[in-house]
Image: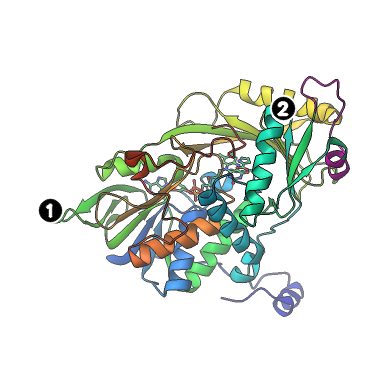
Amino acid sequence: MRRFNLASLLSEATRGHTGWGRQWRSPEPKASYDVIIVGGGGHGLGTAHYLAKVHGITNVAVLEKGWIGGGNTGRNTTIIRSNYLYDESAHLYEHSVKLWEGLSQDLNYNVMYSQRGVMMLAHNVHDVQVFKRHVYANRLNGVDNEWLTPEEAQAYCPPLNIDRSARYPVLGAALQRRGGTARHDAVAWGYARAADQRGVDIIQNCEVTGFRRDPATGAVTGVETTKGFIGAKRVGVVAAGHTSVIMERAGVRMPLQSFPLQALVSEPVKPVFPCVVMSNAVHAYISQSDKGELVIGAGTDQYVSYSQQGGLQISTHTLDAICEIFPRFSRMRMLRNWGGIVDVTPDRSPIIGKTPVPGLYVNCGWGTGGFKATPGSAHVFAHTLATGEPHPINAPFTLDRFRTGRLIDEAAAAAVAH
Ligand code: FAD
Ligand code: PYC
């Protein structure tokens, strides 16, 4: 596989970019693997990359029922931040932000991580108190976060309406400058290319339909798929909104609910929006993509569903909120909208680790906020799969916490209601 660098770019430029070749292979599945990953989103592909790169485990397959990145990875609005309240979460998401900061170099693939800052608006006294608490808690954990007055917030983001007579006036904002956005497809493709280079088989159009288990020990011995049975010593399920469906096939009932989460984009315009702004109270968030579209979203639909569409009232409510906070966008036209299915746990924190089935591991429950966690989650999940034990960072995020009651309640930091 050719590396991307100045010399290769220049040489391809002289011959019309005809010589790049395929970025990853499309192999038939082998009879068995050391590790099978179910789900070719960013988390699954990233796990395969770190298994190969960090742990030297290359006899690995990623099985994807559709095309890689076609799930929530390719549907999300790419906001990255680590301003979570509790120590456990701050460590996990900050681990991820640190990996984002070097990811393009690590993968030799430009994931376009742009640290343009993520600003969370406070609209009432409760918001002010909660966000200030986040700022102080984050700083104690080495996570950058600072409090801005309304005027400072507007200076950072000029389109922001700070008129005190607004129905939800801006009373201040918490700003994480190292937060920002990345290019979602590039994350899937970059991890796929890097994992493939180290020998990982990426098998698309291969749905996992069941599990085989050893009758004596109960341990998983492989997976049934639409391409036949494939043996495995260990299986990691990383299937976002469909995790509970798959885990049920292994006899494990997950504490998850699946909801549609929608987003929409405007027609493209010249650069007008320099950062990411989120408003939990008014219920909308916005950034501008490199193509020029305003990227907009809000919370999940109210009802569980597997339809990747969602209700129209969610989009109209979101646009009402955007027009209130940024009146100048009220004449913009919306181009398209879509939905993805997010998997939500009772405490709004992920589950990363062992299951009651020996050899079967799960990484799920990222709800509305797992894109930002992609590198960190993949890195610690690879450690867990390779060693059979959690990395210290994912040790608190067990499935067992819903039995013991040791929850990590991050509903407030989720920012996007779920
Ligand atoms: P996915 O990318 O969904 O990958 C799971 C894969 O599993 C899918 O490709 C699916 O096809 C495959 N699969 C399912 N069943 C099977 C099977 N039986 N066999 C084989 N393969 C199977 N997070 C943020 O941090 N910031 C954001 O701004 C943000 N915005 C969002 C906006 C929207 C509209 C949505 C829907 C989500 C958003 N998220 C955001 C959440 C984020 O997208 C997800 O948490 C994250 O992408 C999950 O990644 P993943 O790799 O686990 O899942
Ligand atoms: O978790 O920051 C987030 C987020 C933004 C949009 C959707 N999720």
Q: Position of residue 23 (x, y in %)?
A: 56, 67
Magenta stretch: includes residue 124: no
In this picture, is 148 found above or below 143?
above
Identify the mark nearer the N-term, 2 or 1.
Answer: 2
Give the residue drawn at x 49%, y 44%.
366
Q: Position of residue 269 (x, y in %)?
A: 83, 41
Secondary structure at badge 2 equals: helix
> Dividing the picture into quarters, in which one does residue 298 lie?
top right
Q: Residue at x 48, y 67 (%)?
A: 50
Amino acid type at circle 2 is Val
Labelled disc at residue 105? none
Quarter of the image where one finds residue 124 = top right
* Quadrant in the picture for the C terminus: top right
Q: Quadrant of the N terminus?
A: bottom right
Residue at 62% x, 20% y: name it.
313
Residue 270 versus residue 89: which sits nearer the camera?
89
The type of residue carrying mark 1 is Pro
Q: Taking 31 as reference, is 41 above or below it?
A: above
321 vs 108: above or below = above
At label 1, counting other C-alpha atoms closer than 10 Å, the crowd grade (few under 14, some 14-19, many 20 or more) is: few
Give the overall secondary structure of the magenta segment. Answer: loop
Residue at the disc numbered 2: 125
- Mark 2, other Cα within 10 Å: few <14 / some 14–19 / many ≥20: few
SS type, badge 1: loop
Magenta segment boundaries in residue numbering: 152-169
Q: Is residue 153 magenta?
A: yes
Q: CA distance from mark 2 to mark 1?
A: 59 Å
For disc 1, the marked residue is 215
Residue 225 relative to residue 321: left or right: left
Can you give x and y, in whole percent of width and height, for residue 33 in the image? 31, 66
